[in-house]
Every structure is written in C-alpha cells, then in structure tokens.
Image: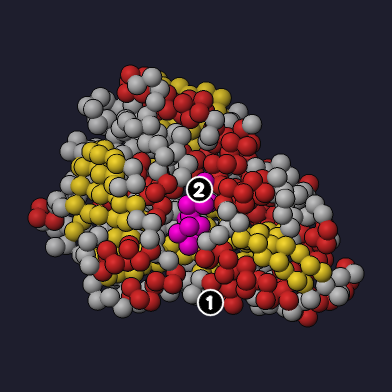
Amino acid sequence: MKKIISFLLILTLILSLAACGGTEPAENEEPAENEEPAENEEPEESEEPEEDSMYGGEITITDLSFNDAKTLDPHLASAAGSMRHIENMYNGLLQYKQGTYGEIEGELAKDYNISEDGLTYTFNLHEGVKFHNGDDLTSEDVKYSIERIIDMEIRASNFAAVESIETPDDTTVVIKLKEPVAPFATFLAYPMNVVVNKNVVEANDGSLDNIDAGSGPFMLEEWKKDQHFIMTKFDNYFEEGLPYLDKVILQPVAEETARNTSLRNKESDMILQISPKDVMSLQNEEDIIVKSVPGTYWEYLGMNMSDGPLTEKKVRQAISYGVDREELNQVVKFGQATPLSGGPIPPGHWAYADLGIHEERNIEKAQSLLEEAGYGDGFTISLITLPNEIAVNAAQVVKQQLADLNITVEVNSIESSVYFERLGSDDFELTIIGWVGFVDPDEFLYNIFTSDGVWNQHAYSNEEVDALLEEGRVTSDREERKEIYYEAQKLIVEDAPMAFLYVNKQISAYQDYVKGFDVNATVTTKSLKNTWLDK
C-alpha cells in the first residue's frame, strides 16, 4: 500500500511539472558552465536594497501549477502548486542555498555537525525564532515535525533510518540513524520537510489543511481556491531585515496566453514557469526579463521490457541509438532543453556521467543491432502519451525517427487518469514521460532503476545496479559516490530500459523592476523573502 501511495504522489508532482513544459536540483554544484543566459537576462550585480524605501509593495505571480494546490499541510502536500503556496510560510532545519544548483545550508539550524561515522546529526537552532501565532519555536517542535512526517507515511522513507531524536535543550536537536544515509541532509532541506507548530497542530486535531502553523517570512492571509493565494509579511521573522515585500499574491492561470498577456500588460509581475515556445516572444519585450537555468526534470522514452521485441536488449539499444535527441529538442522544446548523451543526471551535477554514447543519432548502429536481434525487417509497436501538446509532439517526432528503422509506431494519446492507470499496471509498450530529480543523485536513480523501485514501470531489474544504488545511499565520501553513480549509469544506459532524451531548463519571466528573485533548478520560490521591487 505504501508503494502505491508513493507512486500516486509522484505522479501528481510529475503531472504538474510536465504541464508547465518540464523543469525542477543537483547537490553542491553551480549551474553548468555551457548554459547560455537568455538574451535579456538581468546582470548578476548585487541586488541588495540600499535604502529603506526599497521595502514594501506587493508582487503578483502567475503559474499553471498553482492550480494543483490541494492542502496547506506541508507534510501531506505533493503537488507542485501546494509546494509553491506553502514553502514561504515555513522553515526547515536546512534549505537549498539561493543562487546555487542545490547547495545545502542551514535555515532554522545556525550550524550543524555530522559525526565521522555518519550516524549522528547535531543541529544548533537559531535563538528567538517565533511561529506566526507568537509561540517560540523549540527543538521539541523539530522532533515533533519529523515524527509527524514519519507517521504521515507520504515521505516517511526520507526518515526510515532514524533511530532516535533527542532534544537536550530548547535549541539543540540530535538525530541518530540506524545506518548512514548519504542524502539525509538533502531530505531535511526538501521544501516540505519543514517544522510545524506542535501546539497549533494539536489544537486543530492534527489537521493543517487550511491552517498556517509556520514560522516563515510570510503568513497566510487568504486562500480562495482557483482564484488566489495571498500571504503577508511576518514582522517577527527571525532573519534580520527580511522579508522586503509586504504581500505576495499567487494566482492560478490555466491559459498560457492569458498568463503572457497579464505579464505584458503589467497586471502581474512574474510567470514562474514559461513554455519554451514563449521564450523568444517574451525576450523581445523591453521591460520583461527572461531567465533560464539548468533544471532537473528529465524526460525519456520508456520501454516496457516484460513482453515482445522490447525484451531484447539489442532492440532497446537500437531504439535509443535511433532517436535524434537534438531534433526533439529543437522541434518540441524550441531549443530550450539540454539533450542527454548518457544517463539521466544532467550536466553540471557532480554525479553527471559524461558517457557521450548518444551525442549524435547513429542510425547505422541501430540498424545493425536490429539485424543482430532478428528484427531487421522491423515491427509494429504502440506508444501511449499524455494528451498535452508537448508530449504528443514528442511522440510524433519519435514515430517519424523510428520509421527509419522500419519500426512502425502507433501513437495513442489518452486521458491522464487512464494513462497513469495503464502505466501503473505495466499496460504499455512505449511511453514518453519525465522524472523529477531534486538534489541528490539518489533521487534521480533509486526509485526508478532499482528492481523494487516505486517508479520502476519498465520491468527493469539488474542486481548489479541494485547493489550500486544501495551502496550509493550509505557512502558518505562524494568522490566514492561519484564513481558509484558513474558505474550505475553506465550499466543502465547499456541495458537501455529507456532512451534518455533531455533535461528541461527552468525558465521564468518577470518585470525588470523585480530584484533578488532566484530562478533555480528546484523551482522553489523561497527566495521571495529576498525579493524587492525597484519602482
């Protein structure tokens, strides 16, 4: 049952990201050096306000994903929309560092220490932190929050190795693990693994569906579903001088054209995620900044290995060699994605494996592999996809490309609930979809490529890969982990349970007077506390 619940929650997040054209981190890495900024990207100059006059004002942000908000409970939230609503109302022990490609730093923790054996994490909290209702935030709230996450089951796996949580005083938390977990700090920095007010939760019978129990820079003012979500400045926020804005308004706008028109007319200040096809037109607007950074939402052509021609490794390899990733990028993504020449971890990430196997399409190699597998005359196969424009266009391009190998692809675009039902029951041959990696390589690989992975819908099983991914979870040294994940990706690409296509960029557009907002791979909006308006 837990596997089914996790599977459905992951699907919800993937759906919300895919609908926006794709995007989302990589641990402790700067963006890839070869990434070109958008033409009218703002200069990387200091954007700190110099005068008190820079304080105040309100910002209106539109995005399709805001439609997905289902709950204000951070420990139950899964959809991207819910995350964007919640993450500015709460704080975690740790957070992703602004301006980096997923580097971890303290948030509620002013400092922390990890024992040499990787089993004990000691956190020293900032003093004087207040919840929005005026209660003091203490170590007991931290302990309660982690235990609540475990009880909720949704992200319990993040803390499955926790043996005990000790609170020797109000500002010290000691977490002891049963075994080392390399991405444990990453789990603590995840935007929804935050600290809630124990008193508020208990006073509301454990429910936070419509309740603010946070300590973040902004407080809930009003939430009208499918209309707007309004937050106001928390005057007693513990980070001195923050936030700058008085109010944040998040508006769900389903229609792409409506979002763009609103920005052009200055009825809104920002679109959190714009479609790749809108980049050029918005760049041509004099007062609008378009900024892109490498993302971590990667897309792939998935192959069900349980039956038919796809049981043959050489057939799967042939399909992967026969796909032209750059053509897909140009036709489907308007050149706004980064083709993947090896495994799924993107360039710029410290665990990127520069395999270079699929830098260019190799039709001769593909045809040779099909001949060796006994399918030189080709075959007919079905490809199911979601009914959105990007997925359907990608499927049609793949269909044309594989026709060069005498492979006839029958594309079937189906309603999302039916699509995911078929995916979950392994009732497909080919499909095009994506996966969200956050910060640690474990998040890119473990759940999709281990034999029992919750998102392993391809009947993929390799004991050597299983062992490597388990080893990567308990190895602390980064260089050792890098070697482990290189070998794992090399084996996965060789087995070809899927053809890795490209990783999407995170692209935002905003008025040129918006300063200090961090467009980032994780698509978080936590930098709103640092955002100010130069007008």
For the question of whether residue 265 can be seen, the reply is yes
Percent across and percent down for residue 341 are 63, 69
Image coords of residue 426 (percent x, y): 72, 48
Residue occupied by mark 1: 330
Q: Nearer the viewer, residue 67 or 127?
A: 67
Q: Residues within 10 Å of mark 1 (few under 14, many from 20)?
A: few
Q: In which image quadrant can residue 517 be found?
A: bottom left
Q: Is residue 427 above or below residue 348?
A: above
Label 2: which residue? Answer: 13
Amino acid under disc 1: Gln
Identify the residue shown where x is 44% and y is 69%: 276
Q: Residue at x 29, y 41 (%)?
A: 224
Residue type at the position of mark 2: Leu
The Cα atoms of the two marked residues, 1 and 2, are separated by 25 Å
In terms of image quadrants, where is residue 220? top left
Image coords of residue 30 (percent x, y):
44, 61
| CB-based contact (under 8 Å), mark 1 and mark 2 | no
The kind of secondary structure the magenta stretch mainly shows is helix
Q: Which residues are magenta?
A: 12-24
Of callouts 1 and 2, the N-terminal one: 2
In the image, 188: left or right of 4?
A: left
Residue 146 sits inside the magenta stretch:
no
Residue at 37%, 49% in the rendered image? 66
